[in-house]
Amino acid sequence: MSLDAKLDRVIARHHELAAALAAPDADSKAFARLSKEYSDLTPLIDAIAALRRTRAELADLQALMGDGSDPEMRKIAEGEYYELRDRLPAMEKQLQIMLLPKDAADEKNAILELRAGAGGDEAALFAAVLFRMYQRYAQLRGWRFEAMEISENGIGGYKEATAEISGAGVFARLKFESGVHRVQRVPETEASGRIHTSTATVAVLPEAEEVDIKIDDKELRIDVFRSSGPGGQSVNTTDSAVRITHLPTGVVVQQQDEKSQHKNKAKALKILRARLYDMERAKAEAARSANRRGQVGTGERSERIRTYNFPQGRVTDHRINLTLYKIDKVVTGEALDEFIDALIAEDRAARLSELP
């Protein structure tokens, strides 16, 4: 289908939505859904109008250029014509980007999960660095960051940590952070000054609503137990910690940060729902585009995606071969957008290349 045919379909759908919204008998749920679709399409409609105005102006200028009766007017028309013509490809490319299918999860909040990988205590210390990096990044973007579960190793490191991040476009910006992050540095505990390599795994899951994932109570095994802190000491004296096992998939979620069993169960269900939703998304993505496994956006968490080399002050994202020599600003969240923007651009280019 040509670009113009696609644009015509968008305009027709916008008119349909306007008519449906004007109908007096629309129920509230349908009205909200149609209003959102109408609002989402409006910037695209404006861009289409701008493109078509530019094309009309080019046609008018071309006509003036062909009129030999006024050489001065023809010269002015030529200057304007070539300036507008040079802008046209960028306008068309922007429209193609706007026409790309939206990821339904992009506007969702996210569940962030970090786990220390290879490297023992140093890996746990690095996981804590990453956790704080995302916390600061969330603050810089005006998002809400709530720690849900942290399992410490006793010296300030995190064996595992989970947080909920909420705000505008959270998952859209953080979804490419999933994967194995590698650190190269001299540990504080290393007397000989040798550089060690450790890893931590990051998983960013779209937060699923009940309407996204239906969980039958019969599919769950819920165990309660007394929560404990680092070193096994008791945190409180009641059986408030909750472990939920989803029997069909074997996914297990545990929460013990809250003193209330009810609150721990609610948090655990939120994480379980996010994991199951992410599994469904991964299946759908694999079925839709198996040929993109090696590109950005595959969500493969087994691959090493980024290296943080402290002695050299550099951070390298291996998926897009981008290196920044500003490790301090990356780990404080200030320069993280430079990686995220490049990853989004690369993913967009890959999807554009798939268009017929």
Image (cartoon, rainbow, N blue to C red):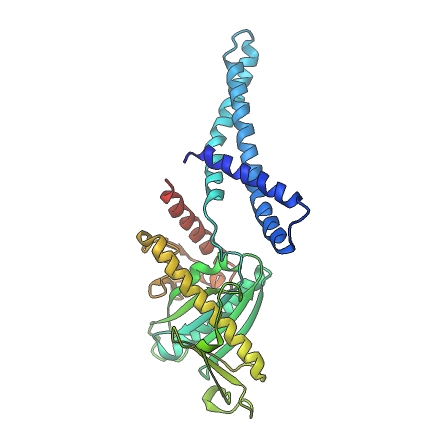
| In the depicted structure, whether residue 52 falls above or below residue 65 | below
Does residue 285 show up? yes
**Could you tell whether 19 is left or right of 117 in the image?**
right
Residue 64 lies in what quarter of the image?
top right
Residue 130 seen in the figure: no
Picture quadrant where residue 142 is located: bottom right
The residue lying toward the viewer, choosing from 317 and 218, is 218
Name the outermost residue toward the right.
Answer: 24
Residue 129 locus on image (x, y percent): 47, 71
In this rendered view, identify the residue nearer to me: 315 or 49. Answer: 49
Picture residue at 52% right of the left edge, 71% below the top: 270
| Residue toward you, 125 or 257 | 257
Q: Residue at x 39, y 69 (%)?
A: 201
Q: Residue at x 42, y 67 (%)?
A: 202
Task: State the image coordinates of residue 267 (x, y, percent, origin top left).
Answer: 53, 75
Q: Residue furthest front?
A: 25
In the image, residue 25 lies at what x, y percent?
A: 67, 49
x 56%, y 91%: residue: 238
Q: Quadrant of the C terminus?
A: top left
Give coordinates of residue 313: x percent, y percent: 41, 62
Q: Is residue 210 left or right of residue 179?
A: right
* Quadrant of image for the N terminus: top left
Q: Foreground residue, 232 or 75?
A: 232
Residue 125 lies, with reference to residue 45, above or below; the image says below
Location of residue 306 by image quarter: bottom left
How many numbered marks, from 0 up? 0
